[in-house]
Amino acid sequence: MKILVTGGTGYIGSHACVELLNAGYEIVAIDNFSNSKPEVVQKIKEITKKEFIFYEGDVCDKDILNKIFKENKIDAVIHFAGFKAVGESVQKPLKYYRNNLDSTLSLLEVMTEFNCKKIVFSSSATVYGQPKSLPIKEDFALSTTNPYGSTKLMIEDILRDLYISDNTWSIALLRYFNPIGAHESGLIGENPNDIPNNLMPYIVKVAIGQLEVLSVFGNDYDTPDGTGVRDYIHVVDLAKGHVKAIEKVLKDSGVDAYNLGTGKGYSVLELVNTFMEVNDVKVKYQIVDRRPGDIAACYADAMKAKLVLNWQAEKDIKQMCKDAYNFVKKQK
Ligand code: NAD
Ligand code: UFG
């Protein structure tokens, strides 16, 4: 079976490529390196000791997609490619709508032309907006608070409409909670060049001395220690969820959403303290005002993925902290 992975050199895409190759799938990957580096292609090969075909190009460009589908018999697609920075999406909404929607529409049109109707899509827990209760289930009401989230919800709608128009499609909408950590080899992971927006990359940069102090956004939330609670999931567990989702779409038609999280919530301070403890390193932090748009707590009910996909997260928060630090230390 041959799987096309868009955004294949990105943070989650690269880990998914590794798990797909390890599981015996052939893969073809495409990325335009707008948020990743060419050397990741080699790292994936180094980890897996397997070869795959890589195309440098833009998923919005139907010519390169046509070329890929002509040159390879693609059985299913995992669509990671897209922009993901919430704050930037508020400043530059058109950039986000253009890239995330255009890439998906081009991809779906070319897939239709080549009669490849199986897709796994990278959605996000952001589509739940402010959840009415916790843990969050897949049938909760959907809403968004920023342009990035709106692109995810719009794409989910596009995919649901596509299935209504033609029920031979097989579509899995994977709603990720908060992926952190890195491959145990330390060869692939997440290390943004700019000042990170997300918690774990920021913690790591403070730990290695590239940034001075972590700002903890608020300690007056209605949570056990007052800081925000999230469902952190190891990126390798998340990647394995994609292998299970591919098995499902290869087998059954339909359109279904799945939460990929651990089902457990940890606060900002719990994550920072665990990081310091397992890595024996100091992370200086200060409490500052809440970040606008943040919710107090967010964690998954991950039972549907367990029951239907036969997947559940296995790695704990300590492993996530160890692997995140190990990766970034190796980049220095
Ligand atoms: P990432 O930025 O590391 O990976 C995305 C990859 O897509 C990058 O390598 C980038 O160069 C590439 N890309 C972007 N636009 C492209 C285009 N038009 N053509 C070709 N390549 C393009 O992000 P990630 O964390 O790996 O996220 C992957 C997907 O998962 C994204 O769709 C993201 O929105 C979604 N997601 C991520 C998170 C998270 O916290 N990381 C949470 C929920 C959902
Ligand atoms: N936080 C800090 N300081 C920081 C960064 C974050 O205190 O420097 C706090 C936040 O207030 C929040 C928690 O750490 O309580 C996690 O924040 P992140 O920015 O790491 O993650 P979010 O939950 O805000 O959002 C992430 C992605 C979204 C995605 C969402 C759900 O950025 O794209 O997870 O998957 F939609």
Image: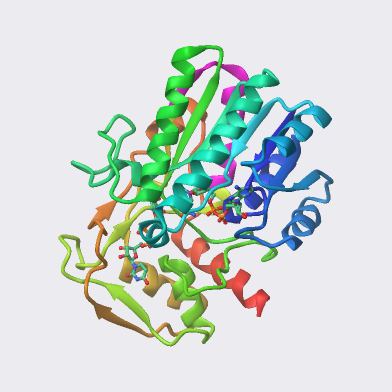
> Please, what is the dominant secondary structure of the magenta stretch?
helix
| In the displayed structure image, the side of residue 275 where residue 266 appears, left or right | left
Residue 68's place in the image compared with 222, above or below, is: above
| In the displayed structure image, the side of residue 52 where residue 100 appears, left or right | left
Colouring of the image: rainbow
Closest to the observer, 52 or 236? 52
**Which quadrant of the render holds ligand 2?**
bottom left
Closest to the observer, 204 or 311? 204
**Taking the image as drawn, is residue 243 in sight?**
no
What residue is at 64 percent from the left and 42 percent from the top? Answer: 59
x and y, in percent, of residue 74 in the image: 73, 28
| In the displayed structure image, the side of residue 146 where residue 319 appears, left or right | right
Image quarter (top left, top right, bottom left or bottom right) of the N terminus: top right
| In the displayed structure image, the side of residue 290 where residue 262 appears, left or right | right
Asked whether residue 245 is drawn in magenta, I would say yes
Residue 324's place in the image compared with 251, above or below, is: below
x and y, in percent, of residue 272 in the image: 38, 73
Image quarter (top left, top right, bottom left or bottom right) of the C terminus: bottom right
What residue is at 54 percent from the left and 16 percent from the top? Answer: 253
x and y, in percent, of residue 21 in the image: 74, 42
Asked whether residue 233 is drawn in magenta, I would say no
What residue is at 57 percent from the left and 72 percent from the top? Answer: 193
Residue 189's place in the image compared with 269, above or below, is: above
Which residues fall within the magenta stretch?
238-256
Q: Which quadrant holds residue 216?
A: bottom left
What residue is at 42 percent from the left and 41 percent from the top? Answer: 152
